[in-house]
Amino acid sequence: MTITPFEEKVYLSSPTMHGEELKYMQEAYETNWMSTVGANINEVERLISEKIGCGYAVALSSGTAALHLAIKIAGERLYGQPRVGHGTLEGHKVFASDMTFDATVNPIAYEGGEAVFIDTEYDTWNMDPVALEKAFEMYPDVRLVVVAHLYGTPGKIGEIRRICDEHGALIVEDAAESFGATYKGSQTGIFGDYSIISFNGNKIITGSSGGMILCRKKEDADKARKWSTQSREAAPWYQHEELGYNYRMSNVIAGVVRGQIPYLEEHIAQKKAIYERYKTGFADLPVEMNPFDAETSEPNFWLSCMLIKPEAMCRQVRGEKDVLYISEPGKSCPSEILDAIAALNAEGRPIWKPMHLQPIYRMNPFITASGNGRGGTNAYIEGEAADVGLDIFERGLCLPSDNKMTAEQQDRIIEAVRECFK
């Protein structure tokens, strides 16, 4: 069966504008506040801190910048201010989510630390608290955990918070993908000692770029503001006593974010409808949608993903940059389905490749729920605990989840996926 491609591309998740954004951008232009100060920045910081319920929000140039400053502040709080040229985590290990975008973990390296990757669990596709417990048994001196909420689904952050409190560890909560999602009635971004959100172009609320660090204490927010503006001291000349960064958000970008914020709940509802439509359309296929615990959390449904059941996987081999698969009747694999989606002029993506499999981090320790894993090698020993992140990566994929996608377009995508299993 041949399905006619779309005339215009259906994206994975592209910005959805409403018009209010232009009003605030125009205001920045007309008042000549085109730099990293202005009313839009002030208002966005106020709106976000109120929405999430955190004490303070500092608007920055990206979610990655926010993660860097969050990890840097946490490191300084734990280990003191380093000498110039040395990171706050120099010589220290940090536990981190394994299945995530590398922006979650790269700032650990920026600050001279070594990431120890914690395996994923199947219930939410996020950090496994059991594996985290094992990691503390193996590395009892670790005092910092960086945890992400994948694809807009909250992880088991209550359990992770309890474990960290028991071991005297701080949490940096990466809520870049989960803005608007809740865990036990509270917004993600409230559970970390320091947390971040992202306004990247593909996020549920966007500024085309931008992000925020969320802090509980004013002194930490003030530190983030200072560091993000090149650490200029309160002197009549340019005085610098610490390393600084050009990380502050533009007032123009903040205008876009300001215009987007009122539409957050609408965007979440649209994303949820997409998720439910896929779930219904695939009900009789040997697949599952990305899971969440309905009793404890409500995702923002940023991306709809699917996982092929093991018995329905056709043969697939992935190298570092290439993939081969063999089609089999009644079976499929992520690569075949992504090819079928691309043939429709639509955009899907593989699941995030786990960090412990990335060439740059293959020598880092990796801990599974059994306490096994690897340290300093990329070998896997037969009989050790399952590598959950690798399994999800091998069998999963992200489906087109753009909230401007019509029901008719999504039906054609569903039909293209169904054809792969015939």
Image (tube, rainbow, N blue to C red):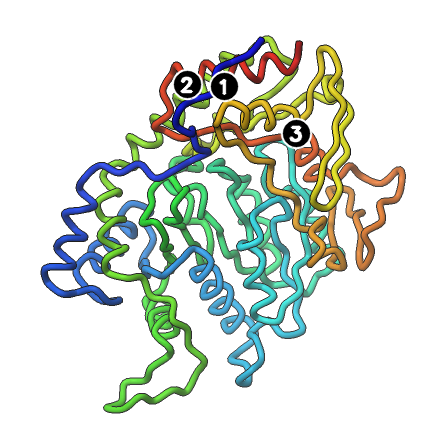
Choose between 76 and 395: the one closer to the eye: 395
- Residue placed under numbered mark 1 in the picture: 413
Using a 10 Å C-alpha cutoff, classify the residue at mark 1 as few (fewer than 14 neighbours), some (14 to 19) or many (20 or more): many
Alpha-carbon distance for marks 3 and 2? 21 Å
Q: Position of residue 282 (x, y in %)?
A: 55, 14
Using a 10 Å C-alpha cutoff, classify the residue at mark 3 as few (fewer than 14 neighbours), some (14 to 19) or many (20 or more): many
Q: Position of residue 344 (x, y in %)?
A: 50, 22
- Residue placed under numbered mark 2 in the picture: 409
**Side of 232 where 362 appears, left or right:** right
258 vs 411: above or below: below
Give the residue drawn at x 63%, y 30%: 396
Q: Amino acid at mark 3?
A: Ser
Q: Amino acid at mark 1?
A: Ile
Using a 10 Å C-alpha cutoff, classify the residue at mark 2 as few (fewer than 14 neighbours), some (14 to 19) or many (20 or more): some
Circles 1 and 2, Cβ within 8 Å, touching? The answer is yes
Give the residue drawn at x 20%, y 56%: 40
- Residue placed under numbered mark 3 in the picture: 335
Q: Amino acid at mark 2?
A: Gln
Of label 1 and label 3, which has the lower sequence position?
Answer: 3
Is residue 417 visible in this depiction of the protein? Answer: yes
Alpha-carbon distance for marks 1 and 2? 6 Å
Of label 3 and label 2, which has the lower sequence position?
Answer: 3
Give the residue drawn at x 25%, y 36%: 263
The part of the image, by quadrant, that contains residue 35 is: bottom left
